[in-house]
């Protein structure tokens, strides 16, 4: 009885780590409000007809693995870019986290030859995962956004 109770608690604990009580939009709103120097960004989410085509710049994960997304990206030749993705499982989240880190490196190479003034934003950039929730933050104040994300994921 004790062993089965412990197994049940362990299963509930590991499941709780992969779920979030927030939507991608709620996470994005809080993260974005902490990054006060962002320029004009265009937004796409699951309600956008072409969200998966736009998100393909970040990851090639299958669309059915994405439970929720909010993605803000540059519109005026700046490096600013924010992406929150809630995935169906932790393995998919690990892939997207890796893809997000790769996206940051790709953007560094791009801006190194295109607009070096934006490189400081990419140096400050981060991509991380909490359970099945991934976030990518490109901007001078990415650490502010990371702080808010970490705080939300621990609530």
Image (cartoon, rainbow, N blue to C red):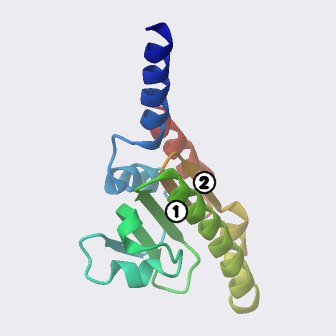
- Res. 138 in view: no
- Res. 34 in view: yes
Relative side of 108 to 92, left or right: right
Q: Which of 87 and 26 is in front in this view?
A: 87
**Rendered position, 76 above or below 150:** below
Q: Which of 138 and 120 is in front in this view?
A: 138
Relative side of 113 to 84, left or right: right
Residue 120 drawn at (x, y percent): 71, 69
**Rendered position, 115 above or below 25:** below
- Residue 55 picture quarter: bottom left
Q: Mark 2 points at which residue?
A: 128
- Residue 24 picture quarter: bottom left
Q: Name the residue under label 1.
A: 37
Q: Mark 1 touching mark 2, by CB under 8 A?
A: no
Residue 37 drawn at (x, y percent): 52, 62
How crowded is the residue under tag 1: few (<14 C-alpha within 10 Å), some, or many (20+)? few
Which of the two discs, 1 and 2, sits closer to the camera? Answer: 2
Residue 150 drawn at (x, y percent): 54, 41
Residue furthest to the top in view is 2
The secondary element bearing badge 1 is classed as loop
**Rendered position, 54 above or below 27:** below
Q: What residue lies at 34% left-to-right and 74% top-to-bottom?
A: 44
Q: Nearer the viewer, residue 40 or 109?
A: 109
C-alpha distance separating marks 1 and 2: 21 Å
Q: What residue lies at 57% left-to-right and 51% top-to-bottom?
A: 129
Q: What residue lies at 55% left-to-right and 56% top-to-bottom?
A: 91
Can you say which quadrant of the picture contains the N terminus? top left
Residue 10: which disc?
none
**Rendered position, 47 above or below 86:** below
- Residue 108 picture quarter: bottom right
Can you say which quadrant of the picture contains the C terminus? top left
Q: Earlier in the sequence, mark 1 or mark 2?
A: 1
């Amino acid at each position: 009885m004790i062993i089965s109770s412990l197994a049940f608690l362990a299963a509930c604990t590991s499941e709780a780590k992969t779920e979030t009580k927030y939507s991608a939009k709620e996470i994005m709103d809080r993260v974005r409000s902490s990054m006060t120097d962002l320029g004009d960004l265009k937004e796409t989410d699951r309600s956008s007809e072409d969200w998966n085509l736009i998100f393909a710049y970040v990851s090639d994960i299958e669309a059915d693995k994405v439970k929720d997304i909010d993605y803000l990206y540059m519109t005026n030749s700046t490096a600013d870019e924010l992406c929150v993705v809630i995935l169906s499982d932790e393995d998919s989240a690990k892939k997207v986290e890796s893809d997000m880190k790769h996206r940051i490196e790709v953007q560094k190479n791009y801006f190194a030859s295109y607009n070096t003034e934006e490189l400081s934003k990419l140096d400050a950039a981060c991509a991380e995962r909490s359970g099945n929730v991934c976030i990518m933050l490109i901007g001078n104040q990415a650490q502010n956004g990371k702080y808010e994300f970490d705080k939300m994921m621990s609530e």
